[in-house]
């Protein structure tokens, strides 16, 4: 049971780091790193969409901040609630990204978030704290 909690927290941390990376390249390296990450998009789109990417980046930074915050909350009930809330945000953002940009986003964003939610719910149910 404690192993599930530890694995879910590690996964949440990795998802947060991934969103910090996304925030960084969308906000500060869109014209250099963006074309590498989104290789299917025409290169000439990156320069004129720098402001739009920076706007997306701040939202990814908020997702990362919420996930990191969830790891720092002492109260176990609120820690779980906040983590699940932000993981749901990540999962939905991944679905939208898959619909609008690339289906690969489901695998790198939605699946890990859903896996972390599942692990958290299983561990909470085993502890008897699932309400």
Image: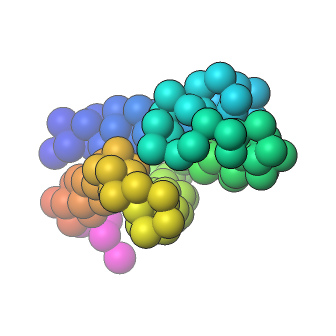
How was the colour assigned to the protein in this rendering? rainbow
Asked where in the image residue 6 lies, by quadrant, the reply is top left
> Can residue 74 be seen at all in this image of the molecule?
no
The vertical placement of 87 against 12, above or below, is below
Query: What secondary structure is the stretch in magenta mostly built from?
Result: loop
- Classify residue 95 as left or right of residue 48: left
Against 101, residue 38 (above or below) is above
| Residue 52 pos. (x, y %) | 77, 51
The number of numbered discs placed on residues in the rendered structure image is 0
Residue 128 magenta-highlighted: yes
Q: Nearer the viewer, residue 127 or 120?
A: 120
Residue 42 vs residue 95, the one in the foreground: 42
Q: Which residues are magenta?
A: 127-131
Residue at the spot x=16%, y=45% of the render? 1
Which x, y percent locates residue 38? 50, 40
Q: Nearer the viewer, residue 92 or 124?
A: 92
* Residue 119 percent coordinates (x, y): 23, 53
| Left or right relative to 116: residue 13 | right
Residue 58 is situated, as x and y percent measured from the top left of the image, at 74, 46
- In the figure, 114 relative to 23: above or below? below
Q: Residue at x 18, y 36 (%)?
A: 3
Quadrant for the C terminus in the image: bottom left
């Amino acid at each position: 049971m404690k192993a599930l909690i530890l694995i879910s927290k590690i996964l949440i941390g990795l998802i947060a780091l991934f969103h910090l990376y996304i925030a960084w390249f969308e906000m500060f390296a869109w014209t250099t790193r963006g074309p590498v990450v989104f290789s299917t998009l025409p290169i000439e789109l990156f320069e004129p969409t720098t402001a739009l990417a920076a706007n997306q980046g701040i939202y990814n930074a908020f997702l990362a901040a919420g996930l990191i915050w969830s790891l720092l909350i002492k109260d176990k009930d609120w820690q779980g609630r906040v983590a699940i809330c932000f993981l749901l945000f990540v999962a939905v953002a991944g679905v939208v990204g898959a619909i609008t940009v690339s289906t690969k986003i489901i695998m790198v964003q939605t699946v890990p978030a859903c896996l972390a939610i599942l692990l958290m719910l299983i561990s909470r149910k085993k502890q008897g704290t699932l309400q």
